[in-house]
């Protein structure tokens, strides 16, 4: 669906190598995501999905390889560098402040201050924050709970939606950002998973580039445009979702099917 | 809390294989994502009880004592007496409370209080200006807070660190005092025993004790700070989930130090008010004050896990302690019974809170699961 709107990838990694001491977690990985595209990153446990995502988010520095955001080369020394370049990671374990309300969570770190002297004293404009939060969520097509509700009173699915929306709001704004999701539906039930799926699709439709780590194949078929499959630290397949046989995908994941990139399998 | 539905073992949690339609069919117009149902009324009531129960408890105590200790209890004079008696506890409780809300338990408070009052006492005895002496005392609180904060940030347990500080400060206070006390500090009377707004020499209106004013200022400013300002909200957020705050790109460490500094300054202030009350600076820290303060904080339902709680409730917690002592004293009951009552009340409140919390969570869980049945 939503065809990439531009020729330059939103995020492109090439020749990525990553070693943990002697363990080679990633070797010679090339991946890219176009604006508005959802790329599903698949692979068995230990295949290197989380590691690759951490490289993208600036949490790890690759041993070799380059990262480009909208065609510009970047070196991420920390997640804040990636965030500044428009790359946001939604963490597997939620990073919400439970006792605080939705609006406060969505605005954490970029609070709206009141105008005038009260603003100089650091007073926040709760009303404005609630309104803008509501507008942002509306834009994402998310209807959760009242903005004044503490996160601890939300269901698991609602929390995940708020966590994803928070990152989406941060990367929206400038020319389509990049969102990295690590197993966003791991802890959710069926219905809640569907909600998160719908949200992911909607964000992509708004031009956000999304990398989705999952080992939930149905989820991938539901929301992704393209699948990148890792096997023991190597990319073994990079295929559009439409028209790709599930059995093939399973074969690539388990390693029973040969890599699409035979040149890259000397060892 | 334990409300996330971690288990997806519920029937229907697995997506129907193969039935997934092509995603291209979706999204003609973005329909709102329904993300669960609204919180039922019973939950709101329970949460209200959990968060406001202490005000009702205090009201109940007042009513009981008003009848039981009639006619001496329910008078303006006695109200002021209670407020004044609770003032010192309230200041320390604010310090302990803000510390806990920020995620740290600062046990050095009595030491900070003793050290600050000795520094102020020494300066007053040496003839420095009163304002300068007071400022120096409060500055001691800042220094102690920064010290505690920076050490704790190195990954040491704040409880141990602040126990160490308590010891250091108690010793230093004795050093400053040279083993004695600083008596006769009448310069501080204006913030001690003095009563303001006396009418008719106290006949018509006895006047409001100075510590009550100080408490009012501390709690009004503290509450506004914690609930309405950016720094206050971040401070509370760090107490609840420092990692989340850090991930949001905020230097969360600064807020940990800020929490210690606030608690240190309030400890120093408590020490100074106490000094003003007795017109004497004493290097002997009274560790008991921290337990009284902790009792008030715990009564207020400030969770020790941090990030939760409110100052007005802490104030009421301190007032409840003062009310119980006052009421029992009027009835001529031995003061140790007040401690017994307070302890029983605290444990009772704890049990009740647990009960309410469990009930809230149970209801929220039920709400989550019912998403499967209640198709919209
Ligand atoms: N911090 C680490 N130190 C050493 N080895 C690691 C570390 N993190 C991951 N690995 C190894 O790197 C490989 C890839 O792990 P990971 O990226 O977590 O895989 P996935 O997310 O696909 O399950 C695994 O062999 C794992 O054992
Ligand atoms: Mg992983």
Image (cartoon, helix red, strand yellow):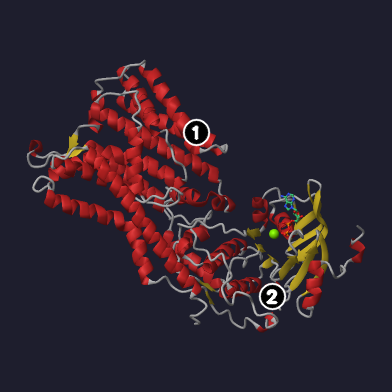
Report if the beta carbon of the residue with label 2 is closer than 8 angstroms to ligand 1: no
Chain on which label 2 sits: A
Judged left or right of residue B140, residue A161 is right
- Rendered image: mark on residue A218: 2
Query: In this orientation, does residue A239 appear?
Result: no
Judged left or right of residue A14, residue B362 is left
Residue at 39% from the left image edge and 72% from the top image edge: B40
Report if the beta carbon of the residue with label 1 is closer than 8 angstroms to ligand 1: no
Is disc 2 placed on a helix, strand or loop? helix
Residue at 52% from the left image edge and 56% from the top image edge: A108
Judged left or right of residue B98, residue B29 is right
Residue picked out by circle 1: B161
Residue at 34% from the left image edge and 62% from the top image edge: B48
- Rendered image: mark on residue A231: none
Q: Position of residue B140 (x, y in %)?
A: 41, 29
Q: Position of residue B127 (x, y in %)?
A: 31, 18
In depth, the one of A114 and A212 nearer the eye is A212
Query: In this orientation, does residue B366 appear?
Result: yes
Chain on which label 1 sits: B
- Residue A23 vs B38, above or below: the answer is above
Q: Position of residue B109 (x, y in %)?
A: 39, 34
Q: Position of residue A8 (x, y in %)?
A: 77, 66
Q: Quadrant of ligand 1?
A: bottom right
Task: Find out whether the residues at labels 1 and 2 contact each other: C-beta distance under 8 Å.
Answer: no
Within 10 Å of disc 2 (Cα), the crowding (few <14, some 14-19, many 20+) is some
In depth, the one of A53 and A11 nearer the eye is A53
Residue at 52% from the left image edge and 38% from the top image edge: B157
In depth, the one of B107 and A79 nearer the eye is B107
Q: CA distance from mark 1 to mark 2?
A: 51 Å
Label 1 and label 2 in one chain: no
């Amino acid at each position: 669906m939503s065809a990439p709107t531009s020729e330059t990838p939103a995020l492109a990694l090439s020749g990525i190598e990553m070693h943990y001491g002697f363990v080679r977690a990633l070797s010679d990985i090339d991946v890219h995501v176009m604006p508005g595209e959802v790329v599903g990153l698949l692979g068995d446990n230990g295949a290197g999905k989380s590691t690759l995502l951490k490289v993208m988010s600036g949490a790890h520095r690759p041993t070799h390889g380059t990262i480009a955001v909208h065609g510009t080369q970047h070196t991420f020394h920390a997640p804040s560098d990636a965030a500044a370049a428009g790359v946001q990671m939604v963490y597997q374990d939620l990073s919400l402040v439970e006792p605080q309300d939705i609006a406060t969570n969505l605005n954490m770190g970029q609070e709206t201050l009141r105008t005038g002297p009260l603003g100089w004293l650091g007073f926040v404009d709760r009303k404005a924050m609630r309104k803008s939060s509501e507008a942002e969520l509306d834009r994402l097509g998310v209807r959760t709970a009242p903005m004044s509700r503490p996160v601890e009173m939300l269901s698991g699915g609602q929390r995940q939606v708020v966590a994803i929306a928070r990152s989406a709001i941060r990367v929206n704004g400038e020319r389509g950002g990049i969102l990295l999701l690590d197993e966003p539906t791991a802890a959710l039930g069926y219905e809640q998973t569907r909600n998160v799926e719908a949200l992911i699709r909607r964000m992509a439709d708004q031009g956000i580039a999304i990398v989705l780590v999952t080992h939930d194949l149905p989820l991938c078929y539901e929301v992704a445009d393209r699948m990148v499959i890792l096997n023991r630290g190597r990319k073994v397949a990079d295929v559009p979702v439409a028209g790709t046989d599930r059995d093939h995908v399973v074969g690539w994941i388990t390693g029973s099917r040969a890599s699409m990139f035979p040149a890259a399998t000397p060892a | 809390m334990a409300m996330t539905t971690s288990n997806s073992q519920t029937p229907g949690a697995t997506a129907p294989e193969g039935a997934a339609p092509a995603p291209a069919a979706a999204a003609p117009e973005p329909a709102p994502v329904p993300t669960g149902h609204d919180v039922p009324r019973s939950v709101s009531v329970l949460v209200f009880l959990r968060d406001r129960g202490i005000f009702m408890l205090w009201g109940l105590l007042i009513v009981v004592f008003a009848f039981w200790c009639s006619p001496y209890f329910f008078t303006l004079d006695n109200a002021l007496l209670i407020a004044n008696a609770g003032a010192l506890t309230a200041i320390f409780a604010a310090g302990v409370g803000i510390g806990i809300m920020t995620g740290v338990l600062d046990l050095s408070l009595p030491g900070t209080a003793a050290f600050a009052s000795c520094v102020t006492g020494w300066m007053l005895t040496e003839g420095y200006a009163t304002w300068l002496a007071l400022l120096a005392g409060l500055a001691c609180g800042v220094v102690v807070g920064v010290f505690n904060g920076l050490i704790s940030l190195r990954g040491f347990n704040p409880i141990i660190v602040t126990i160490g500080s308590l010891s250091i400060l108690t010793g230093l206070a004795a050093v400053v005092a040279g083993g004695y006390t600083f008596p006769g500090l009448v310069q501080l009377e204006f913030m001690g025993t003095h009563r303001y707004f006396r009418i008719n020499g106290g006949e018509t209106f006895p006047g409001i004790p100075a510590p009550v004013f100080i408490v009012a200022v501390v709690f009004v400013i503290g509450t506004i700070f914690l609930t309405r300002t950016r720094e206050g909200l971040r401070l509370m957020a760090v107490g609840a989930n420092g990692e989340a705050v850090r991930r949001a790109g905020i230097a969360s460490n600064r807020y940990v130090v800020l929490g210690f500094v606030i608690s240190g300054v309030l400890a120093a202030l408590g020490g100074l008010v106490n000094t003003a009350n007795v017109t004497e600076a004493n290097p002997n820290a009274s560790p008991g004050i921290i337990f009284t303060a902790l009792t008030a904080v715990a009564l207020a339902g400030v969770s020790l896990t941090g990030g939760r709680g409110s100052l007005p409730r802490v104030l009421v917690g301190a007032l409840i302690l003062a009310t119980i002592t006052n009421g029992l004293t009027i009835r001529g009951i031995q003061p140790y019974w007040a401690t017994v009552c307070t302890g029983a009340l605290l444990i009772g409140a704890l049990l009740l809170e647990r009960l309410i919390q469990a009930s809230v969570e149970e209801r929220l869980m039920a709400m989550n699961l019912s998403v499967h049945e209640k198709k919209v």
